[in-house]
């Protein structure tokens, strides 16, 4: 017996997809940076130290006296010699008053003509203990005023390029169904 048969034949549908990928480009430019450091303000003030040396006595020891000092010394020397001369004449007068004692005039002449022997001495001049010294300290004041840096930063926006992707669809093959009866 022949049984009728149902025969089905299908053809699948085929789709062709063409995909263009999207392109994304991102660039981040560096920030624009400007830094300036002003120099610090420096203020200095000084007071000079002073050293004072008084060498008047040392100079006098080596006979380098000022005019005023030499005049005063000469006046003092003259006064001393006048007083010595007055005392000597007063003493000679007293001796002459006692002339009866013998050879008074011969003694006076002998006193005035005989000079004592000068002593040979070595004398060191320039005694450093005679130097009068005074010292006043100096000072140094330093003031520093720091300056803040000047910073200018500018942020640059990112550069963003985007090309969207595409998908194109086309039917490569249509689907079909064939139904057939076979007897």
Image: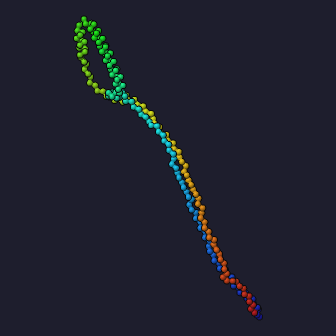
Does the rendering let one see residue 12?
no
Quadrant housing the N terminus: bottom right
* Picture quadrant where residue 113 is located: top left
Q: Above or below — where is 141 with respect to 151?
A: above
Coordinates of residue 152 in the picture (x, y in percent): 56, 55
Coordinates of residue 175 in the picture (x, y in percent): 70, 83
182 or 117, which lies in front? 117
Q: Is residue 152 left or right of residue 59?
A: right
Coordinates of residue 6 in the picture (x, y in percent): 75, 89
Q: Looking at this rendering, what residue extends furthest in the bottom direction?
A: 1
Q: Above or below — where is 114 with respect to 144?
A: above
Q: Above or below — where is 32 with respect to 180?
A: above
Does the rendering let one see residue 137?
yes
Identity of the residue drawn at 39% across and 30% down: 54
Identity of the residue drawn at 28% across and 9% down: 93
Identity of the residue drawn at 57% across and 59% down: 31
Q: Above or below — where is 44 with respect to 153?
A: above
| Colour scheme employed for the rendering of this structure | rainbow
* Picture quadrant where residue 96 is located: top left
Quadrant housing the C terminus: bottom right
180 or 66, which lies in front? 66
Identity of the residue drawn at 74% across and 88% down: 179
Q: How many numbered markers are drawn?
A: 0
Q: Looking at this rendering, what residue extends furthest in the top direction?
A: 100
Coordinates of residue 59 in the picture (x, y in percent): 34, 29
């Amino acid at each position: 017996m022949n049984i009728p048969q149902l025969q089905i034949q299908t053809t699948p549908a085929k789709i062709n997809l063409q995909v263009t990928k999207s392109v994304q480009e991102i660039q981040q430019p560096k920030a624009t940076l400007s830094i300036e450091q002003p120099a610090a303000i420096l203020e200095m003030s000084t007071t000079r130290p002073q050293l004072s040396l008084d060498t008047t006595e040392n100079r006098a020891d080596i006979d380098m006296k000022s005019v005023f000092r030499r005049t005063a010394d000469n006046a003092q020397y003259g006064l001393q010699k006048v007083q010595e001369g007055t005392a000597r004449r007063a003493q000679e007068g007293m001796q002459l008053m006692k002339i009866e004692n013998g050879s008074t005039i011969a003694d006076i002449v002998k006193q005035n003509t005989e000079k004592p022997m000068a002593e040979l001495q070595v004398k060191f001049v320039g005694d450093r203990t005679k130097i009068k010294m005074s010292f006043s300290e100096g000072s140094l004041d330093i003031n520093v005023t720091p300056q803040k840096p000047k910073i200018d930063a500018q942020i640059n926006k990112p550069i963003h390029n985007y090309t969207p992707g595409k998908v194109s669809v086309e039917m490569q093959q249509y689907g079909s169904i064939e139904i057939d009866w076979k007897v």
